[in-house]
Image: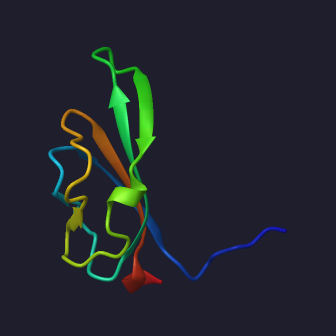
Amino acid sequence: MITHFTDINIKHHIIGGGTAGNHTVTGLEIGDNIRSVWSEEFGTDGAFVGATNLTSEFTSVCTVDDSASNAGGTNTTGLALHFLYVDIDES
């Protein structure tokens, strides 16, 4: 069975990682639903090394514009963070 979702707007952003806590995700707004967060590691040559699912460390619903929090979670300094979320304002 194929399901089409024409009534939702799924967005993604890739940002530089950092210490656990608040991360700036421009465009993320209060009420948006964070569905997936992965840390991605690349070698000095730019080749992909690996990814780790960090979704459970982040709050699932945005509570502060342009911010996602993994307080007490993994330090992702030097990694990329890939956010996938549902934009409720444009659904």
Q: Is residue 65 shown left or right of residue 3? A: left
Residue 85 image point, x, y percent = 42, 67
Q: For residue 84, which quarter of the picture?
A: bottom left
Residue 49 image point, x, y percent = 41, 23
Q: Nearer the viewer, residue 29 or 73?
A: 73
Q: How many marks?
A: 0
Could you tell me which quadrant the N terminus lies in?
Answer: bottom right
Compared to residue 18, the image places residue 27 above or below, namely below
Q: Is residue 11 shown left or right of residue 20? A: right
Compared to residue 42, the image places residue 22 above or below, namely below
Q: Nearer the viewer, residue 48 or 55?
A: 55
What residue is rendered at 27% in x and 36% in y? 79
Compared to residue 52, the image places residue 58 above or below, namely below
**Outermost residue toward the front?**
72
Q: For residue 28, which quarter of the picture?
A: bottom left
What residue is rendered at 32% in x and 14% in y? 45
Q: Nearer the viewer, residue 73 or 3?
A: 73
Residue 82 image point, x, y percent = 37, 49
What coloring was used for the rendering?
rainbow
Q: For residue 26, which quarter of the picture?
A: bottom left
**Outermost residue toward the top?**
45
What residue is rendered at 48% in x and 74% in y? 9
What residue is rendered at 14% in x and 46% in y? 19
Residue 56 image point, x, y percent = 40, 59
Q: Is residue 43 shown left or right of residue 52? A: left
Compared to residue 88, the image places residue 34 above or below, namely above
